[in-house]
């Protein structure tokens, strides 16, 4: 497929939900779109519960190819998706194409994390199918 869309998953800190979405986008939809994640602030490393669970569930080591980065570091993006900002959404210079409105699972149980991961997986696959049409 030529001219794949570039999709950015955006959170304030780019350490958990957006990183999960980038990993699952690359894993499940790289034939249809390129996945990126970013924030308006960064964290020194990706949330370790997210890293552990994604490794257990999908055999993906997010720390191998991903790191916390700022939105301005990304290439030109076609589709902007907010992961759901409970405080204020990061400014990206344009409106979001979609807001997934997901709770931040940071500091919560594995069960809560897994619920969010499965919801991100469902939405990534839904986006993939929309872009194929």
Image (tube, helix red, strand yellow):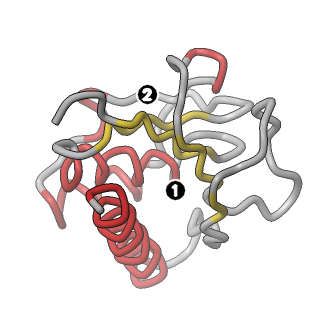
Residue lying farthest to the left in this orientation: 59
Look at the picture and state if 115 lies above or below 73. below
Q: Is residue 14 or residue 99 the one in the foreground?
A: 99
Residue pictured at 51% horizontal, 49% vertical: 18
Q: Residues within 10 Å of mark 2 (few under 14, many from 20)?
A: some
State the residue position of label 2: 67
Q: Is residue 104 or residue 127 the one in the foreground?
A: 127
Residue pictured at 30% horizontal, 34% vertical: 4
Q: Is residue 43 or residue 2 the one in the foreground?
A: 2
Q: Toward which corner of the image does residue 110 lie, by quadrant?
A: bottom left
Q: Indicate the quadrant containing the N terminus: top left, top right, bottom left or bottom right.
A: top left
Q: Is residue 80 left or right of residue 35?
A: right
Residue 66 percent location from the top left of the image? 36, 30
Look at the picture and state if 31 lies above or below 104. above
Residue lying farthest to the front in this orientation: 133
Residue 58 percent location from the top left of the image? 15, 60
Q: Earlier in the sequence, mark 1 or mark 2?
A: 1
Structural distance between the alpha carbons of marks 1 and 2: 13 Å
Residue 10 percent location from the top left of the image? 61, 44
State the residue position of label 1: 17
Q: Indicate the quadrant containing the C terminus: top left, top right, bottom left or bottom right.
A: bottom left
Q: Residues within 10 Å of mark 1 (few under 14, many from 20)?
A: many
Residue pictured at 38% horizontal, 44% vertical: 22
């Amino acid at each position: 497929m030529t001219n794949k869309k570039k999709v950015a998953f955006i959170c304030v800190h780019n350490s958990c939900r957006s990183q999960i979405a980038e990993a699952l986008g690359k894993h499940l939809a790289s034939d249809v779109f390129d996945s990126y994640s970013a924030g308006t602030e960064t964290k020194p490393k990706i949330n370790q519960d997210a890293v552990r669970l994604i490794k257990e569930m999908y055999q993906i080591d997010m720390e191998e190819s991903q790191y916390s980065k700022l939105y301005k570091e990304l290439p030109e993006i076609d589709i902007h998706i907010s992961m759901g900002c409970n405080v204020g959404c990061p400014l990206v210079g344009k409106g979001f194409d979609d807001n997934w409105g997901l709770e931040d699972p940071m500091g919560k149980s594995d069960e809560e994390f897994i619920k969010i991961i499965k919801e991100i997986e469902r939405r990534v696959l839904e986006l993939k199918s929309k872009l194929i049409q």
